[in-house]
Amino acid sequence: MAWVGLDDTDAPDGGCTTYVAVRLMRELERAGAEVVGRPFLVRLNPNVPFKTRGNAAVAFRVEGEVDVREVVERVLEGTVGEHPETRPGVVVYPDRRPPGACEVVYKRAVRGLVGPAEVRGLVGERVEVVRDGRGVVGAVAALGFARLRGREVTFEGIAYRDRGFWGSERRVVEDSVWELDERTFPVTFDNVDRLHGEVLITPHTPCPVLYGVRAVEAWVLEEVVPRVVRAREPVVDYVVFETNQGTDAHLRTVGSLSEASDYESVVVEVRVEGEPRRIRGGHVVVPCEDEEGNRVDLAAFAPARPLTEVVEALRPGDVVRVAGAVRPETPKHPRTINVEKLLPVELVREERSVPPVCGRCGGRMASAGRGKGFKCKRCGERAPEGSEVRVEVPRELVEGRVYEAPPVARRHLSKPEYLVDLGLLEPSPIREGG
Ligand SMILES: [Zn+2]
């Protein structure tokens, strides 16, 4: 009985942590071990400045009389280490349930910043470190996620390419992905982006992943996806992972920005303090303040359209709850929250004056000149100065509704709000606050 955790076995020119994990699992099986349950694919804080692509770690459990460490060493020799930018971390824990310290590491690594030395200090000698790179943080965090009780999970089924195809264009039949979405949405989600007409299950990197399909239930991935998704190239392996993707695990609700660290993702309530402005590249920024008067800009980036339009529709005085990553202050800008989701709590009511309707014929009246009241355009009837009507200017936003980035721009950890509306995922932190 042992747990294996690994991270940062990505290499910039290909390779991917989940692929190394799957190779490890297969080699351990060949050596006589049995992989117990599903492997875990764990996403960590998406804002760390030194992350590898995707920032994913993997943990899995094996049973059997096998020298796990020997097999791990053998597989790692052949897959990682040749790339200087890779800082692999691989750990083995030779018992049934990883120690509680791993859970502490997970909670900190998914939300904040935690260094390898600190992690080694927290877990001590109980966890065997096989590869000592920066990835040891994710490797231990993945064990922590695996032992967490009461956690919310989603699933991802990942298909792997034959080595001869790595780096070439992926030959997934796009029609089959649209068919999959039609047949299994919303149990599978974010397969396609309807607004942008894009298939999202194929990555754009030269890694060994052919496609990855996300779901709220594992059986669809195990039974339906491999039959419906077609590819004009071989699929050499297919594995369903249990994951923290789409669960908002990275978000922490704070009362004010003084409680938030840079690079952390928070949910916080702020008041709009100025006009939104569109900047170069189609991004939109609006100045705000929290209830302590701390200044912060909200920024929505062009790929997150229509979230840019939502931020652009804000008016001074609006109170909104926002979820997103806190970026540090610069000489030119205050701290900035990169908006993932936004919920209008209280929108200001704006009024404007319009001419009255004609009392005789019901036609529209118009100003008869400065200080001269109004005159009907149809019958000539007059109305005195001061008889104009105050009407509320309709707002484009709705209080209490959550606006979010579209699938194409969604972060791995960000919970799709339509799955909450459908009762498939628990309410997100942005709805619980306030
Ligand atoms: Zn009239």
Image (cartoon, rainbow, N blue to C red):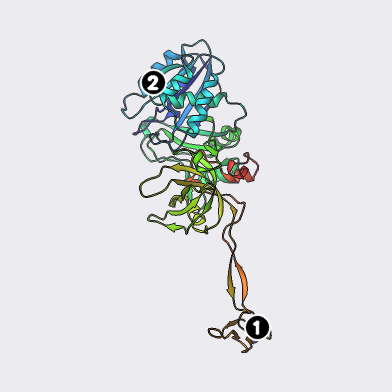
Q: Position of residue 148 (x, y in %)?
A: 58, 26
Q: Please identify the residue farthest to the front as the structure is shown.
A: 292
Instruction: Please give the name of the residue rendered at 62% of the width and 29% of the height, measured from the top-left corner.
Output: 150
Quarter where residue 84 is shown: top left
Q: Is residue 87 left or right of residue 24?
A: left
Check disc 1: other Cα within 10 Å, few if <14, some if 14-19, many if 20+: many
- The N terminus sits in image quarter: top right
- Label 1 CB, ligand 1: below 8 Å? yes
Image-quarter location of ligand 1: bottom right
Q: Choose mark 2 or mark 1, whichever is in front.
A: 1
Task: Please state which amino acid type lies under the numbered disc 1.
Answer: Cys
Check disc 2: other Cα within 10 Å, few if <14, some if 14-19, many if 20+: some
- Say which element carries label 2: strand
Instruction: Please give the name of the residue rendered at 54% of the width and 57% of the height, measured from the top-left corner.
Output: 317
Q: Please identify the residue farthest to the top as the structure is shown.
A: 65
Q: Which is nearer the N-term, disc 2 or disc 1?
A: 2
Task: For marks 2 and 1, give the CA distance.
Answer: 82 Å
Q: Is residue 342 above or below residue 91?
A: below
Q: Is residue 402 above or below residue 65?
A: below
Residue 38 in view of the camera: no
Q: Position of residue 194 (x, y in %)?
A: 52, 51
Residue marked by disc 2: 132
Residue 258 in view of the camera: yes
Quarter where residue 27 is shown: top left
Task: Please state which amino acid type lies under the numbered disc 2.
Answer: Asp
- Say which element carries label 1: loop
Instruction: Please give the name of the residue rendered at 40% of the width and 44% of the height, measured from the top-left corner.
Output: 329
Q: Position of residue 306 (x, y in %)?
A: 50, 54
Q: Position of residue 174 (x, y in %)?
A: 48, 45
Q: Is residue 181 above or below residue 282?
A: above
Residue marked by disc 1: 358
Q: Is residue 228 left or right of residue 163?
A: right
